[in-house]
Image (cartoon, rainbow, N blue to C red):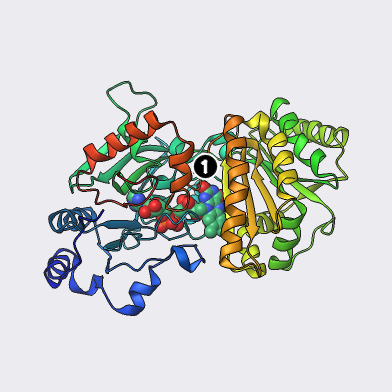
Amino acid sequence: MSNYKPVTEEVLQELRAAVGAEYVYNDVEKLNQYKTDEETDVRFHHLPEVVVAPANTEEVAKVVRIANKYLVPLTPRSAGTSVSCGAIPVCGGIVLLLERMNRILEVNEDAMYMVVEAGARTVEIQELANSKGYLYAGDPCSSDSCLIGGNIATNAGGNKAVRYGTTRDQVYEIEVVTPTGDIVNLGARLKKKSTGYCLEQLVIGSEGTLGIITKATLKLMPLAPYKLDILAIFTDLNKAIDIVPVLIKAGLNPTSVEFMANEFVRSASDYCELKLPHYEDGHYVIITIETFNEDELERKMEQLDELCNANGATDVLEADDRVWKIRRNCLESTRVLSLVNSSDDMVVPVEKIATTIEHLTEVAKDYPFTVFTLAHAGDGNLHFTMLKGNMSDEQWENELERFHAEAYPYIYSQGGRLSGEHGIGAKKLASMEKYTDPVEMKMMRAVKKALDPNNILNPGKIFNMN
Ligand SMILES: Cc1cc2nc3c(=O)[nH]c(=O)nc-3n(C[C@H](O)[C@H](O)[C@H](O)COP(=O)(O)OP(=O)(O)OC[C@H]3O[C@@H](n4cnc5c(N)ncnc54)[C@H](O)[C@@H]3O)c2cc1C
């Protein structure tokens, strides 16, 4: 990393020629704006030297070539909702914004796909698909603000992954600017393909380290006409979590199975100024069922009601959008309680989600912070949010480290991994090194070295190039 060179006037001149002077920013205000993403702990912040906003793929490629020519690191950035410091330019250099490339280029209803530029907002893609009777199934809780390129780069999960998979399952094809500035289309609009390496899937989820996604062809599916959200409330935490494997095994094929422990129920309800039953003492499980047949919906609802009651639910209610508003605002709500917090994202095999949450909840009792628990429970993905509150930086760091030293080995002993959807970013880089098979790390570094010989694209993320 020490080989990087500063952004000189000469570099600025070339960037201005590439994207237009009005889209090259190096004023203090703009640089400050891009020193962080969702990260509020200033110790992770890092100023870029310049921010550029290209208008199209060719301009992106020009910027990447300039970065290589002058050995300047480059961090691609979509909406900056990363919670793993993924969009922070930890080595300085250029931040490249995708936000001007925000068009939805085509919706093909016959063949059920959509072509979008990387800067299109996820919610706009979802809404346009819905308005035509189709579903775009990617649905991170941040969909109101995040951009599709960011979702593809992180392989975002979210609320519908239990049924439809994560973002990588929604993508046919991507246009990519490689780390050396070539433009390539990876993937194809095919149901199946055994034609060489699956490079599009390598770039998807690579957190901006193996290529800049500039365009994508996304899968659409028919929108199920019948849908119901159920809110199952449990006053016993273990019973609330234990219902998850029961639901999965029952063959209900739910679209969502989301778990919120009571701390989150209260903080997010307060934040949204909405109170649903058992606000004070309830743990919520939100279950969504979608069908193409009304009778099937009714049958599944009866089954769901019986299962929840038989497994200790205090209340089983038909829910409306309010419960989703509360769910989507969980992370935001903790900021009000403590500006600095740690939102951890871990994943275990689905059948182990209940025992894992139970175990880590017990472990967390020995720590001076309150833990807020949330899970995309149907896909084994749990989020533990710890609040710093009044702790000193030193105590906070020590206690977090101590907690991770207990939690991560446990997660791995269960067959889990460090991140289910948020990515490693800069935040979990040391843990990635610690818990990943050294041979796997060697393979990842070999891929990075082959595709990005100057280590230009998003350095300091996922792993360092030692
Ligand atoms: C309130 C809240 C709720 C959230 N809920 C979820 C959730 O349910 N599921 C989930 O998975 N995540 C969730 N997240 C995390 C975050 O929203 C996702 O990681 C999202 O995919 C990031 O998109 P973005 O547009 O903000 O990308 P950014 O934050 O700008 O970038 C994310 C990473 O991708 C890289 N990148 C961005 N664009 C490109 C591109 N075009 N080409 C190559 N690399 C690129 C960046 O360098 C960075 O490493 C949540 C975050 C918040 C704040």
Q: Residue 278 placed where, x, y %?
A: 85, 55
Q: Where is 355 relative to 80, above or below?
A: above
Report which quarter residue 20 is drawn in. bottom left
Q: Can residue 301 be seen? A: yes
Return the residue nearer the eye: 153 or 135.
153
Report which quarter residue 22 is drawn in. bottom left
Under circle 1, the secondary element is loop
Q: Where is 409 relative to 38, above or below?
A: above
Q: Residue 327 placed where, x, y %?
A: 66, 54
Q: Residue 162 placed where, x, y %?
A: 60, 36
Q: Which residue is mark 1?
A: 137
Return the residue nearer the eye: 283 or 194.
283
Q: Is residue 78 left or right of residue 8?
A: right
Residue at (27, 69) in percent of width and height: 49
Residue at (57, 64) in percent of width and height: 394
For this orientation, the residue located farthest to the bottom is 28
Query: What amino acid type should be assigned to the residue bearing mark 1?
Result: Ala
Residue at (45, 47) in percent of width and height: 430
Q: Can residue 140 be seen? A: no
Which part of the image, by quadrant, shows the C terminus? top left
For this orientation, the residue located farthest to the top is 194
